[in-house]
Image: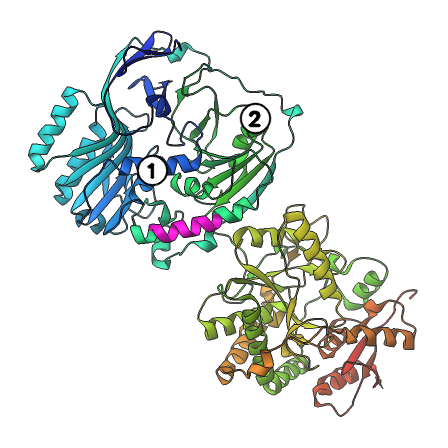
Amino acid sequence: MNKDIINLTSNKYIYNILENLEIEIDVEKCHSEIPIKELFQMAARENKMRSFLFVSKLLGKHIPIDPKDGIYAAMVLRETYRDFLNKKTLFIGFCETATGLAQSVFRNFEGDVSYIHTTRENIPDIEPVLEFHEEHSHAKNHKIYALDEGIIKDAEKIILVDDEITTGKTIINIINQINERYGNTDFSVFTLLDWRDENSIDTYKKLELKLGKPIKVHSLLKGKVKLNGNFDFSNKTPLNNQNNDLQKKPYIKLRNFCMEDILDRDKNEHLLIKNHIKETGRFGITIEENKKLEKKLEKIGDFLKNKRKYDKTLVLGTKEFMYIPMFTAAYMGENIKFQSTTISPIHPFDKDEYGAKSKIQFEDPCEEGQINYLYNIKNNEYEEVFIFLEREISNLKRISSMLIELQKLGIREVNIVYFLEKEKSFSSGSYEDNDIIFLLKDLSLIEMEKETTEREKAIQAGIHYSEMLPVEYSPSEEYLKLFHRSLEENKDKVALATAIVGEKIIKRNGKDIVLVSLARAGSPIGILIKKYIEEKFSYEVPHYSISIIRGKGLDKNAMKYILSRHPFKKIQFVDGWTGKGAISIELQKSCKELSEELNVELDSTLAVLSDTGGCSSLYGTREDFLIPSSCLNSTVSGLMSRTVHRKDLIGEDDFHGGKFYKELLEEDLSRYFIEEITSQFSKYKAIDPSFISEEESIHWHGMKSVKMIGETYGIKDTNLIKPGIGETTRVLLRRIPWKVLIKNPKNENLKHILLLAKERDVEVEIFDDMYYECCGIIKDLKGE
């Protein structure tokens, strides 16, 4: 016989908790077939108000459970209520232990039902509609924040859900508060365990007389308890049965997954609860909203199942945040356990049938100055943990103490899953905030510009082009005339190409996309495509602009950031045009490496306005014409510099860098260019289906022309050959040109090329055996 639990009769038990602290239990009614030993264990609380705790084996709070068991337990509790809910009903769950249970019970009802739970959090900008106390608790204050106070005021019936009631004072406190403020009189209670004695029941009866209606209590188990003895935890050294030798443990790996994309964020509500999500139930949620939430959680669970790397996995809720992680865990595959952190201090002791065999404590990752606890995890019991947080951690150092404790337990990988990202101060350059996010480290205070000749010599001497910047001048009068003339002549063509490639993107990928433009030539084109899709299809598309550098690849940290925040969306890369295809090749290589490293599918197909090189199947046109944004540098690209990657400036965890040239604000034409092109979109509301019916094959004719030019002129370094009107324009604007090749001098699209070449005294030759309309060749400065 187990000496810690003495079974006196079929209905009477004595639990030896610790030392001379024991509790006698007399079971009066059992409303389920779940044996008493499967309902709870006992433990000693580090709390002078109450020295014992019923540690539930169904909640997933202190003892890990199969998440499906937690959902099933709520279904069993719901079955104790035999009546139909034909009234407007509100369920209220009690933090922190019963939030998951309460929402799980609520989900089993139909009709005009809503749910809200109490909280101990202080939420800025919102006043609680109710406050009351839980007298025996270590954290006494409860608050209710309802976005719509009518959820309580208009409720015809209120059902209160807690994990256990001993005296029932907390229930009485909230009933009195609600009745006095709103006049509600119809209350019921759901609880796993009902231990009220005769005095407590009499107090309930007096309240029933006041309300004029009975308060029905529905429980899995009803009985009486008697406490004997005591336990003085103040003089005890807490048990530490974990291995503290960090040197023998593997370094813990950390991954982040942001699920904000999958939740529907009401913009007005977001202004009030910007650091919280409504779906927790903290602010009120209807049964229809909860059903929608569960479908999304199934999708998240399936997604995270495929991210699991190990068999032994723990899903960890945090404090009040229990229902969402528990329900998600139920869809994450086999061999999953669920439990939650807590602010409740329990004395740990390793013995059979004791409710807290081990304890770790650590700093609260989200709330400064608070200690959190996690119980009953054995050494090497799990290899991987998914920590669910309502919001992104503002400072990663805050979670370090938690990670250290998990590492001691032999956990090899930690995945942080959060549903609301912290507000970032990323730049949108000089564009509208909603148009673009540049994922670039701000290097605006660093001097790294070099004059054209000095920079060209350095590049050809072996210094990577990404380690310095060209000087950004105010555009000359000639360049501005060229820009405005080309914009006037080609804005219809650019708008049509934008519409075509936008249609192709949606046809290929559907709605769930993120546009990722390649800074900086791709940045304005990404904005144009975003605006076309939003105007034509009436839904918002996230748009980031990130760095890609020839020879160094995509900015991996920027890509990890995007993928973690949009795990269910397809990435669509965007650039302005293709030349010989060097960036397309770099993109393919980077995507392959990232796909293997992160176990994700990345499509390296590059969407461009003009595929002059035949390098992409996703384009607006293959005509070699002047895209006006190629005429200017930062002043048509959000005042952003080219991207920078220098080891002394860019750390291991940094994004690639860039500068914002605020001194050029008066000359900025970035928004003007966007407005001029988007004003033409109305002409292309009905695109000829033949334009988007089939994707043409990739033929790389451009690269063949580049090789032919290299052989003809004895140029071994193909980086000196810049084919196409856009690239030739840029050679004439910011490099040291040697020669310009043109296919047909009568081509109207070459007017500005001939003008710039004349201005810079650059030789122009006719070379009709090439795929492009023109080609700029950079002067070889080696040896000079």
Q: Main secondary structure of the magenta part?
A: helix
Compare marks 2 and 1 and give the one earlier in the sequence: 1
Q: What secondary structure is found at the residue carrying circle 2? A: loop
Residue for badge 2: 409
Q: Quadrant of residue 501?
A: bottom right
Horizontal arrangement in the rendering, residue 201 relative to residue 473 (left or right): left
Question: Could you tell me if residue 307 is visible in this image?
Answer: yes
Please determine whether, in this image, residue 124 is positioned above or below residue 252: below
498 and 188: which is toward the camera: 188
- Inspect the magenta stretch and tell me whether residue 293 lies in it: yes
Q: Give yes or no for contact between labels 2 and 1 (Cβ–Cβ under 8 Å).
A: no
- Residue type beneath disc 2: Leu
Residue for badge 1: 99
Horizontal arrangement in the rendering, residue 498 relative to residue 418 (left or right): right
Q: How far is the residue under mark 2 from the one under mark 1?
A: 27 Å
Q: What secondary structure is found at the residue carrying circle 1? A: helix
The label on residue 732 is none
Tell me the colour scheme of the image: rainbow
Question: Could you tell me if residue 420 is visible in this image?
Answer: no
Circle 2: is it few (<14), some (14-19), or many (20+) Cα within 10 Å? many
Instruction: Tell me the quadrant of the picture where the N terminus can be found.
Output: top left
425 and 495: which is toward the camera: 495
Residue 201 x, y percent position in the rendering: 15, 25
Residue 499 x, y percent position in the rendering: 55, 78
The stretch of residues the image draws in magenta is 290-300
